[in-house]
Amino acid sequence: MPSPSLQDGIDTAGSPVGLLWKPGAEPWTPEVVEREYVGWRQEQAAWHEGVALLNLSHHMFDMWIEGPDATRVLADHGANNFEKFAVGQAKQYVPVTAEGLIVTDGILAREGADRYLLSGVPAAQHWVRYHAEKGGYDVGFETDASSAFRPGGGPPKLFRYQVQGPLAKELVENVFGGPMPETKFFHTADVRLDGRDFKALRHGMAGQAGFEFIGPWEHAAAVHDAFLTAGEPLGLVQVGALAYTTPSVESGWIPSPVPAIYSAPELEDYRRHLPLFGIEGQRPLNGSHFSPDIEDYYVSPYELGYGKLIHFGHDFIGRDALLAARDADRRQKVTLVLDPDDVRRVVGEGNDPGFVLTYARHWVEAEAGAVGVTMQTASIDPVGTVLAQSLVDAAHAVPGTRVAVVWGEHPGPGTDPGADLGFPRIRGTVQPSPFDRHARTRYRRNG
């Protein structure tokens, strides 16, 4: 008996929202690594004030795309500029549907003239591979699932270690015996450590300086130990799974938006191609923002801040829709700084709530009513409160605007989506996204 498809799951549940709505769902955190090493507060402080080491080796899916049509298939199904994409460069890949709505992003690295590596949540990988196979492109694929989903277990093909924080440069120079090669943002340099060759990706998180080191798993332990040893005099802190999930709230990246694939009739074959027990069928929806219409959860790349990545100099799926929407009014990405007293009252029942993390969609309200929705909410101890990465109407996106977050878990289908369920409100103030000034003004200046 064949495994059920995503479309089978939707049909059984009665609707995409019926399938995905799971009140109180536990938020995702990276697998395999420790939840905390020295405590999430100290780990957050490390990349703000010192130096932090993060292990990204286990939770991302990787897909290599290689062949004469590798660039063409990616360009035909992504909005990025492939005319300016150097070997050794990485980009946020932006695949969209025919309606110009995001499928879900990923990090795309060009490893050769006809070879790319697409990493991250596998929804973008599924989209590219499906269209490549259906379209007869001359291209092959090699995949490596995350450690929690890798068939047969075993280690990943690659290690990934991030070194972040004000002391990152000093740590890296101590490890390699000198400065890194001059490298633009999101470009890689070849490095060698004790005879081991791997890559250094110029990267950053929450506006802090740093690198991501990527190489064959056989070198993982030696490279990790080298950073731990050299970092000890600098107070190096390893970052666990809890703290790892939070810098995106400061840096303005919205992880895993709902793929806009559940409703278009022309994508039924795609939904029948996708397994039910994959990211598209299992990533939950929850929070106070409930709608029976899945299209109310779709987002455009413009809303996510990807407008500068869109290149209209080539044809691709969704080009006409994006071109038509380029100057349209839309929600804007902002950071909500939540009132700490309200956070203690509502989330902590009068006490310090400790670590807060949710990907739930909560309504954002103003005097006029609902004006937006939260996308990710997390405790940021160096800021002293909880931040919520959100999408709000342009009229309420001005820094300093006062709003409120409706905090609660709507029961979902069967309840009037407009019913007043008595959810408490948490006051918040609109601030820019990215929240971190360095990330907002200088993060990609040399990209």
Image: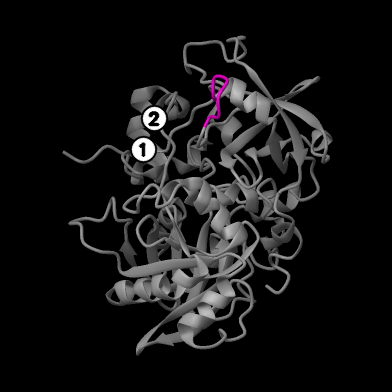
Left or right, 81 with respect to 109, comes to right
CB of mark 2 within 8 Å of CB of mark 1? yes
Can you give x and y, in whole percent of width and height, for residue 163 in the image? 50, 68
Q: Quadrant of the C terminus?
A: bottom right
Image-based side of 291 in relation to 332, left or right: left
Tell me if residue 298 comes above or below residue 74 in the rendering: above
Residue 412 shown left or right of residue 400 in the figure: left
Label of residue 273 in the image: none
Instruction: Identify the main secondary structure in magenta.
Output: loop
Per the rendering, the mark at residue 10 is: 2
- Residue 138 in view in this figure: no
Residue 99 vs residue 193, the one in the foreground: 193
Secondary structure, mark 1, is helix
Q: Residues within 10 Å of mark 1 (few under 14, many from 20)?
A: many
Query: Which residue position is annotated with label 1?
Result: 6
Residue 349 magenta-highlighted? yes
Image location of residue 392, percent across then percent down: 73, 35
Image x and y of residue 141, in percent: 35, 67
Instruction: Using the image as rendered, state which of residue 133 and residue 187 is in the foreground.
Output: 187
Give the Cα separation between the discs numbered 2 and 1: 6 Å
Q: Is residue 320 above or below residue 80?
A: above
In percent of the image, x 51 and y 43: which residue is there?
259
Q: Which residues are magenta?
A: 348-353
| Amino acid residing under circle 1 | Leu
| Image quadrant where residue 86 sits | bottom right
